[in-house]
Structures are given as C-alpha cells and as structure tokens.
Amino acid sequence: MLDSPPESNALLNPLSETETVEPSAIEDRMVRLFDQVRVPLLRYLSAFPLALPDAEDVVQEAFLSLFQQLQRGKSHHNVGGWLFRAAHNLAVKKSMRSRSDAEKTGAFIGVEELVIDPAPNPEDQFAFDQRQQRLMSVVRALPEQQRLCLYLRAEGLRYREIAEILDMSLGAVSIALGRSLAHLSRAAER
Amino acid sequence: MPQEFHLSDQELLQALDGELTPRETERAQSHLAACWACRSRKQEIETAIGEFIRLQRSALDGQLPSADGPRALLKARLAELSATQSGRPRWFRGISQRLGWAAIALAVMAPLLYWSLSVARRAPEPPVTVTVPNPALTPGAAVLLSDRQVCGQAGVKNKLVPVTLRRQVFAEYGIRAATPGAYEVDYLITPALGGADDIRNLWPESRNLTVWNAQVKDALEDHLRDLVCEGRLDLATAQREIAENWIEAYKKYFHTNSPLARDY
C-alpha cells in the first residue's frame, strides 16, 4: 500500500481514515468514491491505447478489487493511490490484449486526438489549433514512462505515489517529469 | 548580483510541486528572488503545465459519458459481491466432507463434461428469445416524477445505454453472442414514463425472434403515455403494469391477444 504524505490530495483519499468501516457502509462509500475518482482515472487511462469501454471496464475492475480488499479488512490507507496503481496494472494487461480490437472498433479518444472548442475568429482559431497540435504531438512523442508520469502528476499524485504506481525510483520520476515538462514548455514557446 | 549557478528544470519543477526538502526550498526561493532567468524559466514550466491540464480537462471531460450507467453497474456488481461474500461461511461449512464427494463427482463427470464442451464448440449457440424480462434481474426502476412532470417533457427519447452496461445486461441474461440487431437493450419502464437509468430497469429485448418484440413494446409505451397525459391512467399504475408484465399490459390496453400492425 502506498504511503500518503501529509499534503496528499484529500480528494483521492476519502477512505484514508484509520477508523473501521462497517461492511454495510463500504458499498455506499465505494459509490461516493467512484463518483469522485472515475473521471481522473479515465483521464489517466487515456494515456493507454484503450477504447473507452475498455477503460471503463478497467475502472470497474479496480473498484471491485478495492472492494474485495476492504471487505477482507485490508488497510484503507491512501485508497486513491491504490486505485491508480490497480488501474495502471489492469490497463497494461488490457491494452496488450485489446490493441488490435481498439484499432478495429475506434480507439478511446485520447488527449492527442481531441478537438478543442473553436476560438472566436479564424485567425485565433488557427493559432490556437497550431499550438494545441504542437503540444499534442509532443505528448504523443514522449517516451511511455514520461507520458505516464505526466498524466499521473496531472491528477494530483505525488512523486512518491507515482514512483510506487510505475515501479520507479523517486529520482527517476523527478527526471521523467522534468524532461516531459521541458519538452512541453519548448512546444509552448514556439 | 551575478549568479554563479541556475536551478535545473528538475529543481524548478520540484519546487513548484512542493517536493523539495525545507532546506532545498529555502535555497531555491532565495535564488529565484534574485534570478530573472530562473523566474522566467519557472514561469514557462508553469505555463506548459497549465496548457496541458487545460487541454486535457476541457476537452476530455466533456467527451466522457455520464457516470449514471457505470455507477449503476458498479452498484449491481458490488451488491453481487456482497451477497457472495455473506454466503461464503455456509459454503465453507463441512467443506472437507463435500470435497470428497466433489472429487468422486468430478471423476464421473469429467469425460461427460469434455464431450459436452467439444460438442458445444462445434455447434453454434442457439439464439435466446427474450420476450419478458427476468423479474429478479430487471424488476424495473423509476425516478420520482409526477404525471405532470412526465407529460411536461416533450419528445423524451431513450438514452443510449453505455457499452459496459449493455455487456453486463447480456452477461446477466446469459447471452454470449448474437447477430447484430437481434436484441435491443431496452428500458423496462421507458424514460418517457419516468423509467430510470439503472441496470434494474434494463433488459435485452428480442427484436425479431418473437412477435412480442421491441417494436410492439414501443407501441405500448406510446399508448400508455398518451393515456397518462390525457388523465385516463395514473402514472404509478402505468409503471407498475409495464414492469410486471408488459405483454399482459399490451393485451389489456389494446384489447387484443396478439400484437397489432402498427402504422409508422
């Protein structure tokens, strides 16, 4: 289980209290947690080559695994980090299996494929599109580990949590984030 | 004052993320206070982060489907898991005694099982005809709306059921494969009569395998809504009757024992 630093994102740790939770209450709390964390998890999963239904399945499976853990009386500490790690592991397996399916049925709309709302006039729109395209091509071209670090950090996870999820050292997380941000800022400057 | 060193991108990022030790933070802050170049670089990194976050959230969040379907599915699966867990102690009672019988049964059944599986692999699965939902799986679910609220909503259409929820519905009904269009995952109580987006209100309705198909049920739904909105039937009765047995409701309200041809 991940250690949660004191300043860790409170949104992702709604079950992190140390009190014992009654089994009957776990389901309700899981659903509340689902409402809070589903979208951040799906955003993170958009870094994988998964179709949206597969990404939704991954989120469901992660929650069911967590539920079983909680039912067995496992620790509730840093549930958000645990969910991201479970979703990451499931996504790695699933993306290997469903890569070809996604190509056939239409891949999950990843951040690199998004169409942004139009700007007020055509010139601004053009400049805006160019900038976004540049940014997205940089994100797309990032090495996988740098891209995953970036997506996890974007969801508010701390370096220690990212290191646990991706099985990296703290230093490697810091370097990966530094490099990905350097690439992004160069793209933004141009 | 000339600067002898500059902060690396990594240090600037760690400073922004609150990942430096107190001593390192103090050093970085005093450097930033005196160094325009590093302040400018820090600003660039912040801008890049901001653009990435804006891009990801403004567009992606808007494209994600509503949480209603996935939430309903999760609730159903959690309830199922809870039921399994609460039943476990009984399963474990006397398990060692049963284990012996199970081993004997397995030895007897294994050749039979192998044969049946090999036959099943060769033979295509026959289509399952679903004319009425299984009340244990699909009892029907409605939102709290009055007759006036239901009738005030003009042109209410059934929402598209998310793929994950459709899969779950098919799985519950044991339908593993079907030709495209053979079934419609339909709302038992239609949203036009206050039906809820809930797995308990969804079932795989045959389109072509039976005369009591999705199109016939659509006719009943339209007719019941007309009756409710004309004040000739109360909403709760319409919801209850369609949920209990929509075919019987059809026969009752159309005064017929077989589906009528419908003008489209």
Image (cartoon, coloured by chain):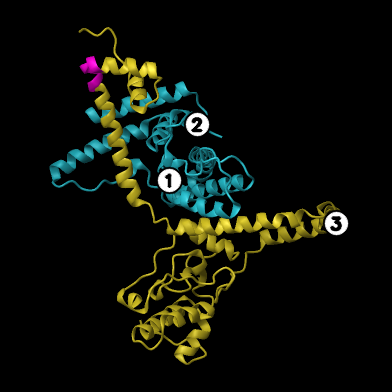
Chain colours: A cyan, B yellow
Residue sitting nearer the eye, A32 or A57 = A32
Residue B60 is one of the magenta-drawn residues:
no
Q: Quadrant of residue B56?
A: top left
Q: Does residue B243 lie above or below B104 as drawn?
A: below
Question: Label 2: which residue?
Answer: A166
Residue type pointed to by label 2: Leu
Answer yes or no: do the residues labelled 2 and 1 have beta carbons within 8 Å?
no
Task: Choose between B113 and B123: the one closer to the eye.
Answer: B113
Separation of residues labelled 1 and 3 (CA atoms): 47 Å
Q: Is residue A4 above or below residue B227?
A: above
Residue A53 placement (x, y as % from top left): 46, 52
Q: Quadrant of the N terminus of chain B?
A: top left
Badge 1: chain ID: A
The answer, for residue B67, to whether it is visible in the render is yes
The residue tagged 3 is: B101
Tell me which amino acid carries mark 3. Trp
C-beta proximity under 8 Å, tags 1 and 3: no
Q: Is B110 displayed left or right of A108 in the figure?
A: right
Q: Position of residue A142 (x, y in %)?
A: 38, 30
Magenta span: predominant SS is helix
Q: Amino acid at mark 1?
A: Leu
First in sequence: mark 2 vs mark 1: 1
Residue B197 or residue B212, whichever sits in front: B197
Q: Alpha-carbon neighbours of circle 3 within 10 Å: few (<14), some, or many (≥20)? A: few
